[in-house]
Image (cartoon, rainbow, N blue to C red):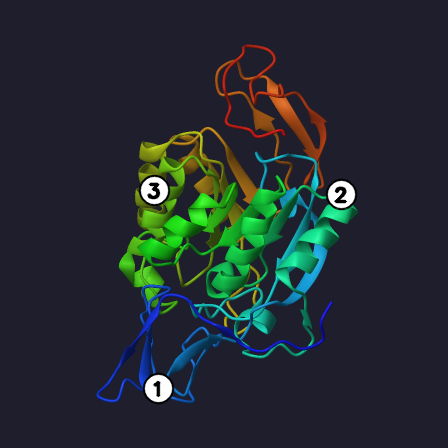
Amino acid sequence: MTEKTPWTSARYWKREGNAKENTRCLLCPRSCLIKPGERGVCLTRLNKEGELLALNYGYMCAAVDPVEKKPFFHWRPGTEIFSVGSFGCNLFCPFCQNAHLSRFGTPAGLHYVSPKDLVSLVQKAGYPSVAFTYNEPVVWYEFVMDVSILLQRNRMDTVLVTNGFISPDPLEELLDVTMAMNIDLKGFYPRTYEKSVGSVEPVLHSIERALEKGVHLEITHLVVPGINDSLEEFNSMIKWIGDHSRYIPLHISRYFPSWQWDKPPTSLEEIRIRKEIAMDHLHFVYTGNTGEMNYTFCPSCGKEIITRHAGRPVKIFVTPEGKCPFCNTSLGIVTR
């Protein structure tokens, strides 16, 4: 492992201005115009003398987590996954649960690891996949791509926990090397994303493209009082998801006060109401941060196929092909 590394050239940008001294980042829909010596909103892109650099390349924290913690309930349930994160985010959510990483543009406390060293470390430890999580992997794009290509060559998998706020071209590249995604869908109306200084359309596009390209997809929705607690909006969102596939697992999570948002925690009743609504359109709906049991039932025969305790599976009745062993229904659960 190396202690220091030069900043890496960013991808997806162009020069602008009469003297071509400004840089326009094209990685996400923000399209930040970055002047010399300044950074983009995500805090990871620096214009250094007319060149756009990625400041977070290789800087990371790491942990081994249960895959259910990401959360993934239908992708290799019961396994552990090597999880890495860096700093920076291209949204500005006042209720961010990981603001200590997402909103501070410095690698302080993080360690540099090259893509080759990371893949070697994970391989030797015996983990078949890497999750890019904790902060937003989109703004870690160059490193995520380099690691993912190496993982793919070694028959290992890339998993993303992301807000899905990314431009179409880099999204397509990312989907080509990604096996599973959990996309955080914060709401369905433009006004909800305006509170995070973003827009919903690119996120919906990411969901659609992931489905079209056969990437395993799960969706998380954090219910935040004063941000996205409209039942009308929730109904519209759930219908849209269900129209695309009733088999997409949905995780409805309870908010707790964090960073700049001090509203009381989401009530358990609000979470339960939303789960009942969602079950009319989706086969698999789970709750997060509630302490409730989240079992998985076959939508065809009604048999319990995954029993969980404290968020971890204790019994898994799913065939290696991802089917119900009782009625042979395909469930979209990846077991290997």
For badge 1, the amino acid type reads Lys
Q: Which residue is drawn at 37% across and 64% down?
A: 27
User: How far across and down, in percent of the image, does residue 266 sit?
Assistant: 52, 56
> Badge 2, how many Cα within 10 Å: few under 14, some, many 20+?
few
- Quadrant showing the N terminus: bottom right
For the residues carrying marks 3 and 2, which lies nearer the camera in this image? 2
Q: Position of residue 321 (x, y in %)?
A: 57, 20
Mark 3–mark 1 distance (CA, rounded to whole Å) = 34 Å
Residue hosting label 1: 35
Residue 239 tag number: none
Residue holding disc 2? 126
Nearest to N terminus: mark 1 or mark 2: 1
Q: Helix or strand or loop: what does disc 3 sit on?
A: helix
**Residue at the right extreme of this rendering:** 125
Q: Secondary structure under badge 1? A: loop
Q: Is residue 100 above or below residue 276?
A: below
Label annotation for residue 208:
3
Earlier sequence position, callout 3 versus callout 2: 2
- Using the rendered image of the protein, determine whether residue 154 is visible from the camera's viewpoint: yes
Residue at position x 59%, y 17% in the image: 303
Distance between the alpha carbons at the discs numbered 3 and 2: 33 Å
Q: Is residue 96 above or below residue 204?
A: below
Kindly indicate whether the residue at mark 2 contacts the one at mark 1 (C-beta within 8 angstroms).
Answer: no
Q: How crowded is the residue under tag 3: few (<14 C-alpha within 10 Å), some, or many (20+)?
A: some
**Image quadrant of residue 328?**
top right
Quarter of the image with the C terminus is top right
